[in-house]
Each structure stands twice: as structure tokens, then as C-alpha cells.
Image: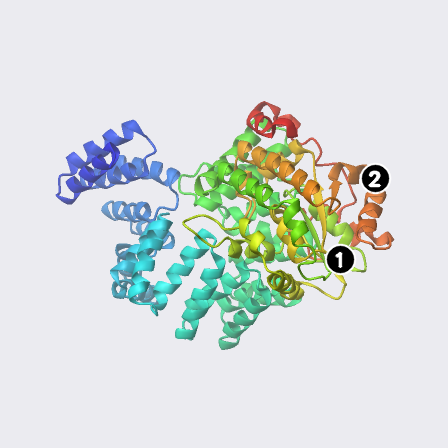
Amino acid sequence: MTQRDDSLKAAQAALQSGDYAAGAKLATALLEQDASDGEALYLAAVAARYLHDFSAADGFLKRLHMAMPEYGRAWQEEGHLALAQGADARALDAFTRATRFNPALAASWREQARLLGEAGRTQEAGAATAQQQRLAALPKELVAVTHHLAEGRVLRAEEICRHYLRQRPRDVEGMRLLAKIGLELGVLDDAEFLLESAVSFEPDNVQLKLDYVDVLRRRQKFARAHEEAMKLYDSDPASPLFQSRLAIECMQTGEYDQAFELFEQVLQKLPNDPATLTSMGHALKTRGRREEAVARYQAAIAVKPDHGDAHYALANLKNYAFSDEELSLMQAQAERSDLAFMDRVHVSFALGKALEDRGDYAASFEHYEAGNALKRAQTRYSADAMSEELAKQKEYCTAELFADKAGFGCEAPDPIFILGLPRAGSTLLEQILASHSQVDGTLELPDILALAHRLRGRKLGQSQYPANLHDLKFEDAAKFGEQFINDTQVHRQDAPLFIDKMPNNFRHIGLIHLILPNAKIIDARRAPMDCCFSGFKQLFAEGQEFTYGLEEIGRYYADYVDLMDHWDAVLPGKVLRVSHEDVLDDLEGQTRRMLDYLELPFEEACLAFHKTDRAVRTASSEQVREPINRKGQNAWQPYQAWLGPLKNALGNSV
């Protein structure tokens, strides 16, 4: 135990014994060593409240909210402070936020129930009381799991939850929490199995069903997610919750007209719901209805100015120009101490884009870096671990391996893998090829990544993949390839070929070749500084954690180039490399080159790709609906003064 831990423990003991002055002294001493120590700020705020130094307590909480905006206990303490000052309305808001961030805070539910009851809001008071009673009935182990999960101690939460389930293997709340932990850790197949089992044990548990739909969507099992969402909707077609959930699943299965109709039904009942307005905006954007999407995003912001998702959605249109008023509004949100974590992340990236458009590059970079720093602190990404993982592909995926396994796999020629780094121009290549009559564009499909995850297994804590590719049997390689073809069928229409645009598949070209030897692979490559800085400016939904730091993204690009050189050496002619800059210089020549590689006849529609009517869900959705242009080239140059870590990490790749 460190000296800090000893001091925290002593401060907690002092507060519990009623010696608030001693607790305050110990907490303040810790803050002199680290002014942003969240636990010390919390203890200092509690001590100041008990000492009736409300001004000091308020100051500590403001600092705590800035450092940890989604720390439920901090908001609970905000509620207690407001009550001590007779500010019931402020207290109710604080206790509500507390349970949003940590639903295991019994005192916050109790105070909500009391305050709502006194305000005559009996239905809401009853709901808060029900949550309090539910929490009281939960086993103490699961309450502890909920606390640990809410406060970011995921591995400790997993340890307690697994121990609990070993004693009570059919406890559905334990299974639900373990599935939630699985989602946090990216173990989606385990989470799906747990929720599927839990739903079979309690088929009328609505929360389980909602969680099950979510995990099915996360695994891109869109048809199954739609089916489960439809069951919920059929059970109560008037429920805005079920209407909204079905609308989201309709978007995933391409049923946009039904999605729009369902969103409108929700908005008839909840006309100012910012989440629904934003979700509908996303659907409209995906279908190319830009102006309608903008109107929905702006409506969401008008209702809830701190709704960061909508601010960033406007920025993510790439060609949207923020007004001076919109810029001032975002700046005001960024200055708030109580802005929620993801709202702050979204607003930071949106401000980066708005200030970039104005040529204020210093302020723009400051906001891009702030947003990335928040995400970087949240992730467990390690550049060293990624370098080691990619080096293992070179070590085990040798020319000898492929010679030994010649003739393995499913012979289907259907898949076209477009891979590389995100923001390298892969969406443009997909749009060009999907404009061909014999090619379906689909999505960034997770199937290859999921197979690699299954092959990893665990042996003394070490991944068995890709070393175990040497043990791959003929029948297993064929089975894996056939499974890929079958599982991806749901995303296709009727063309003989289809595109999987998951960029991270470049890590697994050896696996792809072994299970789908006739698949085509296109490496979408872009100039390193353009590609990396574009990735740094982009807030990805998930799966691209290397983009949250300049050094991290530079190392990743260098490792990618090195691994692609290896694939060229051990699988000569397998991969077609297409430079983004070459496409800009000679669209027709590069299009014909790709079609020749795919053994397809030339079609003029490929050159008019921006006229192709299809849903595009990536960050480049607006850009590929315009004729080819050079707007993104050299966008990094005005930021040169701050890009030293990126250039150093890229090394010889620049």
C-alpha cells in the first residue's frame, strides 16, 4: 500500500469517526501533492460540508466534476450539499445525475423518492422508490459489482461477479452484469451467450431483452437484433422505448423508411427528446438526406445545448460550417465543470473542427488534443502490445506455412477485402467498386476479427494465435471460410461479389488467405501524415484506440507498412495496393486497375460513384457523395508545430 493509500484510508477513518477537521486536513494535504486527485477531492468536499464550509465544499466539487464528470458519488455529494443549503431543486437534479452514472447509490434513490414525493410527482417518486427497493433486495456482491463497474474498476467487478456466479450460476442479474463487463472488455461472444441464457431463464425481463438486442447489434447480428426488437415492439407497440429500439435496428437492416416512421412516432410523444432527434439525424445522414439531418441535429442542440453527440454529428458532416453563435455555444459548454464525459469528448472534437475551419489552428489543436487525451485515458491501448501482436503475424505466417496449407479453405471468390488504416480512402474505393453492377458494398464486418479472437484462446495467459495456424486442419479452414460466406449473406443483395471494408483486417491477411484463398484483397493506402492526422482528428465509435495519441497512431502506421511488406513477400501478388493520391490523380486509370484485378469489366458508373444511391455509414459518408476532390490533402501542414511526436513515431514511413 502506498503512502497516498494510507493517507486516504486515514482520512476516510477520520470522517467515519466524526473528526471532520482531521479528515479535511488529510485530504487537503493529498491535494497539495496532486490537485486533481479525485478521491481526495471527494473526501475534502464531504469534510467541508460537515464543517459547514459550503463555499469550500462547492469548490472541491467543481474541481471533482471537471476531473471526473461521471463520478456518481460526487453528484450524490452535490445533492447532500444542496440539501444542506436548502436548495431542493438543485439537490434533485444532482441525485438524478448520481443514479444515472451509478445506479447502486441507495441514498440518491431514497432522496429522489422523498423530493419527488414532496413536489407532488408521485409517479416518478414511486419509480425511484422501486429502484431503491430493488437495490436493497440485491445481494451485496452484485451491489459491489455495480459500484466497481460504474467507477471504472472493471477487472475487480469481473472478479467478484464470476465468484458470485460460481455459487449461483442461474442468477440472471449476475449474468446481466457479467455480460455488461464483457462488453466493457470487448468479449462480445461471452456477453451474447450470457444474455441469451439469462433471457431463456427470465423471458419476461425487459431489461435483459434490451441488453440482448444491444449485444446482438454490437456483434453485427442485425437480423437477429431486429427480430428481438420486433418482439419487444409487438408486446407494446405504443411504447416510445420499444419504438425507438426497433427504429435503430431497422437502420441496421436497411429498412430506413420504417425507421423514419418509428422515429416520427416517438417524436409525436416526446417531441423534444434529444437522443431521438440525433438518432434520426444519423439515419437521414446515412441515406444522404443531409439538410434534414442537419435540422434534426440543430433541434437536438436547441433542446439540450450540452448534447455533445449532436454537436459532433454536425462537425462529422465534414462540410458543415458552424456559425459564430454555434461556436460560442460549444465554447460555453466546454467551460462547464459538470459536462458529462462523452459530451465533453464530443464537444472537444467539434470545437477542433469549427476552429480549424476558421484558421485558428492553435486553438483547434488544443481541442483535438483535449478530446483525444480524454479517450486515451479511458482506453487500455498499448502501442508496445500492438507492435508485439503484429510482429507475431510475421513470425508465424511464413511462406512455408502457406505452401504447407496450399489448397486449404473455402473456394468461394465472393469477398473483396478493402483494408489498411481508417481515413486512408477506403470508403472512396468501396463507393467506386460498389457502383459496379457485380459488387455489393456492405459494412465494416467484424467476422474476421471475431474469428481471430476465438482462435486466440488462452494458454498460461498467452494468445495461441497466430501460432496455431500451423495446426489448422483442412476441414476447419473450409468450415471457417464457409461460415464467413454464410454469416455475411445478410449484408448482401444479389451481386456475385461483395466488399468487407473492415480496415483492421490487414492484421489477419494470413488467416484470410488460409480460409478464403480466392478472396481479393485491396490495401487502401494514403500518405502517412495525411492519414495519421486525419485519424487523430476523427472520433471513432470503437475499435480504433490507436488514434487517440500522435505517437500511438504514428507507430501503428509504421507497423502497418512493415506488416504489409511482409504479406507482399510471403503472398506475392495477393494484395493490390491502391494509393489514395493515385486515385486523385487518375480516377479512371486506378478504377480500371482495380477492376482488372477483380476480373470485372469496366463500367462507367464506377466513375460517377458520387451518384450511387446507397447507405454509407462511415465518417466519409458525405465526402463520397461529392465528385472527387483534394480537400483532405495536406490538412496537417498548418499544425506542423505540434506534430513532432507523430513525425518521430513514423520514422522512415514519412
Q: Measured from the top left, where is residue 161 in percent x and y?
A: 33, 58
- Name the quadrant of the N terminus: top left
195 relative to 171 in the view: left or right: right
Which residue type does callout 1 highlight?
Asp
257 relative to 30 in the view: left or right: right
558 relative to 601 in the view: left or right: left
* Residue placed furthest toward the top: 641
Q: Measured from the top left, where is residue 25 in percent x and y?
A: 19, 31
Visible residue check, residue 542: no
- Name the residue that disc number 1 marks: 613
Q: Residue at x 34, y 59 (%)?
A: 162
Contact, CB < 8 Å: mark 1 with mark 2?
no
- Tally of numbered discs: 2
Alpha carbons under labels 1 and 2: distance apart: 23 Å
Establish if 374 lies above or below 260: above
Q: Measured from the top left, where is residue 378 in percent x and y?
A: 44, 42
Mark 1 vs mark 2, foreground winner is 2
Q: Residue at x 32, y 30 (%)?
A: 35
- Name the residue that disc number 2 marks: 586
* Mark 1 residue crowding within 10 angstroms, few (<14) / some (14–19) / many (20+): few
Q: Measured from the top left, where is residue 343 in percent x and y?
A: 48, 45
Q: Residue at x 34, y 33 (%)?
A: 36
For the rendered model, the colour scheme is rainbow
Which residue type does callout 2 highlight?
Asp
User: Could you tell which of marks 1 and 2 lies nearer the N-terminus?
Assistant: 2
Q: Choose top left, top right, bottom left or bottom right for residue 483.
A: bottom right
Nearer to me, 318 or 267? 318
Nearer to me, 337 or 139? 139
For mark 2, give the secondary structure.
Answer: loop
